[in-house]
Image: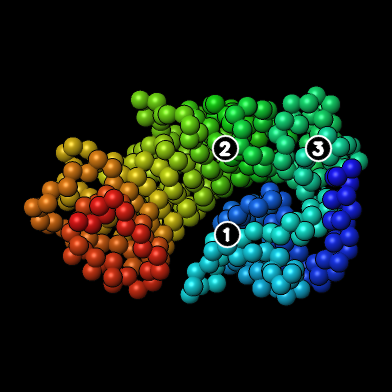
Amino acid sequence: MRNSVFTDAYNEISKVLFPSYDYLPQYLKMPFLYIGVFPLDYDIPISKIINMLANEGWFHNTNTKQSLEDFVWKCVHELCTNRNLALYERSAIYRVWWRINNRKYKTCRLHSSWRYVCRREARKNKFYHVLKKLVDGSVDIVKGQRCLCLENNILFGIKDFCNSVRLNCPSSTRSLLYFDPYHQYPISIGDDFKLLGKLDALNLRLYTFPTEILTLVLLKYLALTCNGNIPTTISKLFNLRVLIIHPHNNITSCIAPSYVPIQIWDMQDLEHIEILGKSLVAPCHSASLKNLLTFVGVNTSIYTILELSKKVPCIRKLGVRIEMAPYDDHSDLLSCFGCISTLGSLETLQCSIINHVVKYDYVFPSPFMLPSGLKKLHLSGMGCSWEYMDVIGSLPFLEVLKLRAYAFR
């Protein structure tokens, strides 16, 4: 009874709000509807929207990832400031964080009433469908849906529901999103959907890498939370553009280090790599990732960084943890930054130095260099003298600076 009352209320609100949506320019409608796929009170990273939309293939008029990013930023900005979407004197999309001197928002959040409108309209147009109750799996609703979003992962453990979805959706579904709150029980991953281009399962608990998804060769976007090693056969997913793998926070890592498979360097379409807590080894062969724009989260050594700088020529965001060996000294570390400074397209650098023995009476023989185009710089554990701050102060485009854990002394 209570749910019926809420539904009736939302239907009435929708009648009032829908004309404002209907008046939006056509190019704004799809991004606005897409924001509604995320859960209630969820701070949506704009970078996540960009990565997900970029791999849907909807924007045929954008030839590069850069132009797509500019287009999506423009859409979000217009939606955040659009007066037709105002509700109780607040924007339908709340700007949660923004740069003072830039148009870019870091996250946004959709009002619950607008979220209802977006989801209803998206379901009607077979854009996406949210699976939350048993009735959501009925044939007349799920058939032909392009994207399925699970907000109740336990539904895939119910035989009738599972059979209905797997029977009526594989031929049309291109995206599968698991947005149910994180829980400890493993469930089946959607390996029956052979035409999937996007799989977001960060909220699922997977004890090991699900090798069955390696048959989904059309995947362009893959996001998982799992422990254990990434199989060397990951290169079978040769269409991947976005690869995101996070570990379980409540499971301690093994004594033996876990490595990013070297075969990843053969995946030439990769644009975004976010692999947390695993060690990276640069390949000895000449392979390079010329399309890679973001590479964050990996553990590495000074030697690997020296090689890495030659193999990611177009990188724009780099985030690494450099583990110092007992025989490494400051000269090696500064040479590492010298190689990073050759990355002319780098805009964001996040570098954390681990196991660094700081010698307070040491005189640095090498200059400290950074890419001149940096906009964001996060440093930790370097232990360099404060006189090197002059180098940072001379960066013409720097907007964000974060220094932690004896970045300087």
Q: Amino acid at mark 3?
A: Lys
Q: In terms of depth relative to the viewer, which is nearer, 268 or 339?
A: 339
Q: Left or right of 233: which side holds 21?
A: right
Q: Dot 2 corresponds to which residue?
A: 224
Look at 80% across and 24% down and name the residue there.
Answer: 159
Q: How is the image coloured?
A: rainbow
From the image, which quarter does the N terminus lie in?
top right
| Mark 3 Cα shell of 10 Å, populated few (<14), some (14-19), many (≥20) | few
Which disc number belongs to residue 309? none
Which disc number belongs to residue 107? 1
Q: In terms of depth relative to the viewer, which is nearer, 253 or 58?
A: 253
Look at 76% across and 73% down and name the residue there.
Answer: 84
**Mark before the other along the chain sequence, 3 or 2:** 3
User: Residue 183: horizontal and vertical position, in percent?
Assistant: 61, 33
> Quick one: SS at disc 1?
strand
Q: CA distance from mark 3 to mark 1?
A: 28 Å
Q: CA distance from mark 3 to mark 2?
A: 24 Å
Marks 2, 1: nearer the viewer? 1
Q: Amino acid at mark 2?
A: Leu
Which disc number belongs to residue 133? 3
Up-down relation of residue 320 to residue 104 (above or below): above
User: Residue 221: horizontal and vertical position, in percent?
Assistant: 61, 45
Task: Classify residue 87 by image quadrant.
Answer: bottom right
User: Residue 331: horizontal and vertical position, in percent?
Assistant: 17, 51
Marks 3, 2: nearer the viewer? 3
Look at 58% across and 55% down and name the residue there.
Answer: 45
> Quick one: SS at disc 3?
loop
Look at 60% across and 54% down and name the residue there.
Answer: 43
